[in-house]
Amino acid sequence: EVQLVESGGGLVKPGGSLRLSCATSGFSLSSYTMNWVRQAPGKGLEWVSSISSSTTYIFYADSVRGRFTISRDNAKNSLYLQMNSLRVEDTAVYYCAREDYASSSCDYWGQGTLVTVSA
Amino acid sequence: SYVLTQPPSVSVAPGQTARITCGGDNIGSKSVHWYQQKPGQAPVLVVYDDSDRPSGIPERFSGSNSGNTATLTISRVEAGDEADYYCQVWDSSDNYPKVFGGGTKLTVL
């Protein structure tokens, strides 16, 4: 069974940092592109970042480029999102999502971890 | 970056057909995916590549895509279908590989 479990969320002050993790199981992480998608309270889904299976391709949304860094450790079956210089508008539930290699859809999602940026 | 436009809300009576649209410039040339999200839950993929269904998704969910509009159709709507629905495309033209629509709240009357 495919499972994605996010962790690392919490309350942080503006300007602070946080590192999110996504532990995966039930599939070979090394074969898949992975994504982070966030959802601000009461708002829609916003794609944040993608990383290809071998880390050759990494993309970021304009809203986080230069502040967030996506990475992965295939040996540890884990995906990460290092978030620096956090802003109030980064407050959201952050989901990790596996990307189906044929369709580029996100076929499996974690349950999400809440990041709250507030003074 | 590419923009996807969805109606904020759609209402339908049980047993009827719901149609949720997703507008975008020449969206018919792209593959469209649809997600269902119920309150407090993670999104679930219900249609991929315009009209294919993942295993476990009822046949009542179908999709189409042509011109500037993609459509998610839910036949014989049930109370349990009440949720937010999001369309998504992969945009290879720039560095924004994934774009989501703003979401549509489906209300079952």
Image: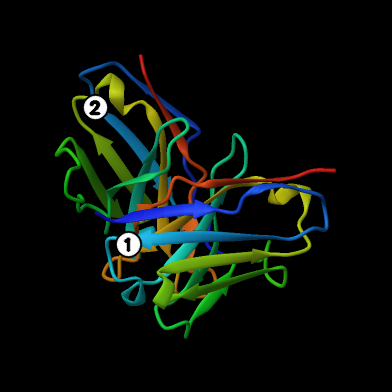
**What residue sits 46% from the left and 29% below the top?**
B9
Check residue B17 in the rendering and tell me which mark sits there, or answer none.
2
Question: Which residue extends farthest left?
Answer: B59
Check residue B9 in the rendering and tell me which mark sits there, or answer none.
none
**What residue sits 47% from the left and 75% below the top?**
A73
The kind of residue tagged 1 is Ser
Question: Which residue extends farthest right?
Answer: A119
Instruction: Determine which quarter of the picture holds residue A20.
Output: bottom right
Q: Where B56 falls versus A83 (above or below)?
A: above
- Determine if marks 1 and 2 fall on one subunit: yes
The reply, left or right, for residue B97 in relation to residue A60 is left
Q: Is residue B95 visible?
A: no
Is residue A65 or residue A20 the one in the foreground? A20
Residue B80, percent across and down? 29, 24
Q: Secondary structure at mark 2?
A: loop
Q: Is residue B19 visible?
A: yes
**What residue sits 74% from the left and 60% below the top?**
A17
**What residue sits 52% from the left and 55% below the top?**
A37
Residue B87, percent across and down? 40, 49
Residue density around tag 1, few if under 14, some if 14–19, many if 20 or more, within 10 Å: some
Q: Quadrant of the C terminus of chain A?
A: top right
Is residue B78 or residue A88 the one in the foreground? A88
Mark 2 — on which chain does it sit?
A: B
Measure how far apart labels 1 and 2 are at the Cα level.
23 Å
Check residue B31 in the rendering and tell me which mark sits there, or answer none.
1
The reply, left or right, for residue B31 in relation to residue B77 is right
Colouring? rainbow
